[in-house]
Amino acid sequence: MLAIPNISEALSRAIYAELLAHLPPGSDNSPEGIELRNQRAMTVVAHLLPENAAEADVAVQIVGAQFHARDALRAAVCAAHDPAEVRRCRAQASSMMRQADSGIRTLLRLQAERTKAEKELRPAAMERAGYWFKSVSVPEPDPPASQPAVPPLAVPPKLQYGAMTPAERYATLYPDRATHILVEQGVPANLNFPPPDPQVVQELLSSGSPIVRALYETAKATWPSPWDGVS
């Protein structure tokens, strides 16, 4: 099975299972033919590059519509002796292809919005978490010889976004949401945003990552009352 990024393996399996359950029968219904059809469908979903569950759901709808369009065209060929049935099958194929095209536009819009959000949020969130980026400011002059030089601060290693854990990615992309989860020590009861995967919540609450720890300390300073007695 081809894993879907940023969601659990169990959820990936559930999404692929829903896709395979709604695929039409192919021209080859042998076990080998069915397995090949299933692998083809899942590979096409993966090649649409979904990065989360919402994008994966749209990708599954696209692939399902494409398979049903091909099935309707196949039925039109088989019904060549019945002009009315041929027209009906071709109309169904056209409808499925329109749905697939609409789904592709939706998926591209979701991916563009996600990419924009990542570009806008990632640098600010990482700076708040103690990760520094290249500065274009003029460097400070060296201290006079009579003054001892101040040793440089220990800078934590920079992490590439792809090398982060799921909780670090979530805290980087959605610092406000992650902070609310840290303040509440779990998913807030009055939730006003989509809840993350339970594994992400668990990792946020137990992670020693500098990114998550920085949000933890910021939350304690910003909202002191929920943190009374919390070290």
Image (tube, rainbow, N blue to C red):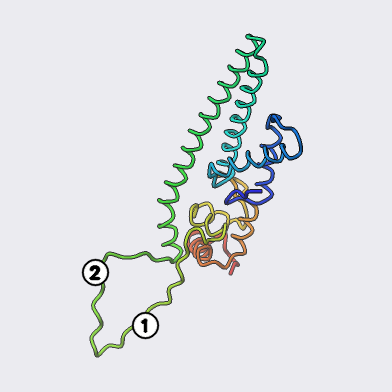
Establish if 90 lies above or below 163: above
Label 1 sits on residue: 151
Task: Determine the CA span between mark 1 and mark 2.
Answer: 19 Å
Going by the numbered disc 2, the residue's amino acid type is: Val
Q: Residue at x 58, y 40 (%)?
A: 44
User: Mark 1–mark 2 contact, CB under 8 Å?
Assistant: no
Q: Residue at x 68, y 46 (%)?
A: 13
Q: Residue 190, percent across and down?
A: 60, 45
Return the mark for residue 138. 2
Establish if 33 lies above or below 115: above
Mark 2, secondary structure of its residue: loop
Establish if 144 lies above or below 106: below
**Left or right: 156 as drawn, with respect to 42:** left
Q: Residue 220, percent across and down?
A: 52, 63
Q: Count neighbours of disc 2 (C-alpha within 10 A) and say few if under 14, some if 14 to 19, many if 20 or more.
A: few
Going by the numbered disc 1, the residue's amino acid type is: Pro
Q: Nearer the viewer, residue 3 or 158?
A: 3
Q: Earlier in the sequence, mark 1 or mark 2?
A: 2
Q: Residue 152, percent across and down?
A: 37, 79
Q: Nearer the viewer, residue 199 or 178?
A: 199
Image quadrant of residue 92? top right
Image quadrant holding the C terminus, namely bottom right
Q: Residue at x 63, y 40 (%)?
A: 40
Q: Residue 141, percent across and down?
A: 23, 77
Q: Count neighbours of disc 1 (C-alpha within 10 A) and say few if under 14, some if 14 to 19, many if 20 or more.
A: few
Mark 1, secondary structure of its residue: loop
In this view, the residue farthest toward the bottom is 146
Return the mark for residue 128. none
Image quadrant of residue 25? top right
